[in-house]
Amino acid sequence: MRLDGDQPVPPRRDWTGWLFVLFAVAAIVGVLYANGEKDGAHYMARPHPVAPPADVVPDAPPMELAPVTEADARTQNLKIPLVTKGFVAARPFVYAGGGDAKARARDCLAAAMLYEAGDDAKGQQAVGQVVINRARHPAFPKSICGVVFQGAERATGCQFTFTCDGALSRRYSDAAWQRARSNADLMLSGGTDPRVGLATHYHTDWVRPYWSDSLEKIAIVDTHLFFRWPGYWGTPGAFRGAVSGSDGPVAKLATISPLHAIALGLSADTAPVDANAAVGEARVVTGAGESAGRDTIYIQLDRKAAPESFVTTALRLCGDKPYCKFMGWTNPVLKPDSDTMNDTQRAAMSFSYLRDDKAGFEKALWNCSEYKRDDVRQCMKR
């Protein structure tokens, strides 16, 4: 009941419920904004890394290894976190050219796949994907052969060590070479390896490149670790460069690829040059008893020859023997005259090569006090 002259009293409103609703809505919007998703679909666009200026491109780090033991390398590599956020498989790649250019690109890619991964299809596929990723990335050459043989003309600085450590002197069987070429053809015709994503770098887990901590580890395939650039340079937007479809010849492939040899005006059956072919006679000691069939070769090497040529000499003299031990000296005075050698002669050894097919072992080592090697794994232990 209202008395005359009194003003009407408005009803009291309870704002507590409304405030609760507003806070709840704000919280939900915050969560959706952070996640960028609602019911599996994109609700709000996630911020994408902004592309830097076109002239700001990262430098490709050289393959320089830290001087650590294999055990320490494995321990340190294990501590590098595996980054799975933003993992994206590479888009299929189709080579733009044809004819001899495509065939030369195929042989460049096949050589990388075979000499880096051996006669293993899955390993070759991973290597092939990294090569193609590099060719699409502005930090690397824009052709398949250019990527594979980047830096191979220098004594140090090659990106794939097989192109400058003498490994090309080692001959795989014709069947293995043809398998690698077939696998390379598939990669140049749209094949991909989704396991390694947009990786542009890789190494085995028993070595420790200095660049390991500056890139993101994104995949592990057997004993190999794969890395991509951090930030924008590791996103799909960075892998859009046009790849040349006109690969030219590479001199270092002339010994195994007739297409490269012919394009260089060389004979299709060009053989590798053995700079030590005329150097002092090799002395072969044939094993007896339990060591039967285990030959050891002692030889004087040419001090002026390229150290990579020592591999060619060893392969020539070992032939197709399943076991062969090769030891060479550039100092004829310190080359042993018998099967035994003293510590001074052993320390003066310039190069050694050991093949043991039964154990699945093959290794070439240099005396790094005489011949500097980029990869410490190629140095004799002292």
Image: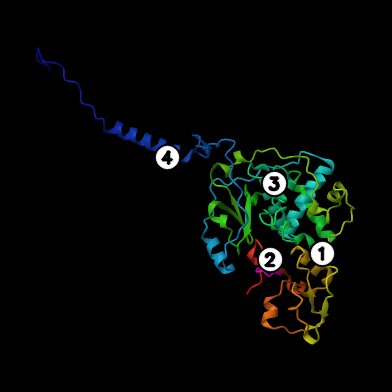
Front one among 371 and 234 = 371
- Which residue type carries mark 2? Tyr
Which mark is first along the chain, 4 or 3?
A: 4
| Mark 3 neighbour density, 10 Å: few (under 14) some (14–19) many (20 or more) | many
Q: Which residue is mark 1?
A: 275
- Mark in front: 1 vs 3: 1
Q: Please, is residue 377 above or below residue 177 in the view?
A: below
Q: Is residue 68 visible?
A: yes
First to last magenta residue range: 365-370
Please tell me which residue is depicted at 51% across the width and 60% down the height of the picture: 79
Q: Which residue is mark 4?
A: 31
Which mark is first along the chain, 1 or 2?
A: 1
Please tell me which residue is depicted at 67% across the width and 50% down the height of the picture: 130
Q: Which residue is mark 2?
A: 371
Labels 2 & 1 near each other (Cβ < 8 A): no
Residue at disc 2, secondary structure: loop
- Mark in front: 4 vs 2: 2
Q: Which residue is mark 3?
A: 132
